[in-house]
Amino acid sequence: MTKLARHLLPRPWVAVVLGTTIVLAFLTGSVAALSGSTPLATSRGGQPDREAAAATGSPPTDDQASEAKVPRLLSVNQCVDQMLAYLAPASLISVTWLSHGSADLAVRELLHRIPANHAQIEEILRLRPDRIIGGEYGAPGLQALLPRFGLTLQQLPLAEDFPTLYANWRLLGQWSDSSATAERIVTQIDNDLATLRGELEGLQIKAVIINPNGWVAGSGSFQDAFLTRIGLYNLAAEDGLRGWGEVNLESLIRRPPDLIIVPQSHYHGGARATQWMEHPILGRIGQRYPLLVLDAEQLACGTPDLLTAAEQVRDHLRTKPARLPSP
């Protein structure tokens, strides 16, 4: 006991106060309260905590190895938001504001329940995450500020092919202590896309994905990798485009694809960037299948939602009859 405590309180009262504090801390299960720390292994968002899961009698997986500390993860990248929502939802303490939109994702409701951030240093310091995770090119201002506070931004490479995508899943699995879950997701995506490829490859379909302002993806892009993986031929890549380029109505009329896919973002109101895609000529240029609209975010991040987009392509080709080019 310090001299100050002796001066302020008679010794019997000191014993009573200290004894009461210890009893209360024990009853609340928060030994951390005595040291001034905050317990990190509590459950979030309706997710069972690790201790409760162990109490069911189920053998723990390697993703439940440490009950003492669940890593607190903060994401400043929309794709990282979605990937961590699949990998480690109980660890995700904040997502980008973009993930509070209306995209048709399996994890949408979960993402909406997690507080949003705008990649501001004040938000990071207040939330005190164990890891801050972003993409290869995002949040440059935050990246420059973090070292001043002894923090770093861990970045995932931009995935332009499936090997890089799978490596990103495994890396996030390491960072979130969820390696087994990451491996299961990789296996699911790879196997399901291989099955779809077996169903679609024999149709010999030449497709093109047309993004806002007529941007199309050639070889060396993830959209090209997606089309190839499900057994379609990317017309833009076949025409020699590498990376990104633009297409217009005239070029589509001269060389019509069998299938046009349009990724649609969920923004309110119209946009001139996509208005030209409503031109009636697109319904008469002779493609074998009607235009297909997919959710842009299902295509973008390489999560299991990508399988939903791939299945929509398959179902579209099954239910919409092929037609001969217009004379």
Image (tube, rainbow, N blue to C red):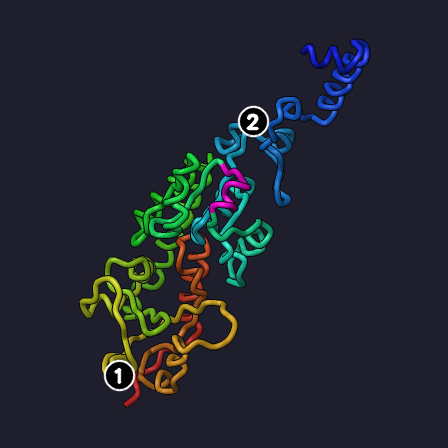
Image height of 242 relative to 160, above or below: below
Residue linked to disc 2: 68
Report whether 201 appears left or right of 125.
Answer: left
At horizontal 28% and vertical 70% (from top left) the residue drawn is 206
What secondary structure do most residues of the magenta stretch adopt? helix
Q: Is residue 190 visible?
A: no
| Image coords of residue 248 (percent x, y) | 28, 79
Q: Residue furthest bottom?
A: 327
Nearest to the observer: residue 135 or residue 54: 135
Nearest to the observer: residue 37 or residue 200: 37
| Image coords of residue 140 (percent x, y) | 36, 50
The question of residue 125 being in magenta is answered with: yes
| Image coords of residue 82 (percent x, y) | 47, 51
Looking at the rendered image, the quarter that the N terminus falls into is top right
Where are the magenta residues, as a range?
Answer: 121-129
Residue linked to disc 1: 250
At horizontal 29% and vertical 53% (from top left) the residue drawn is 161
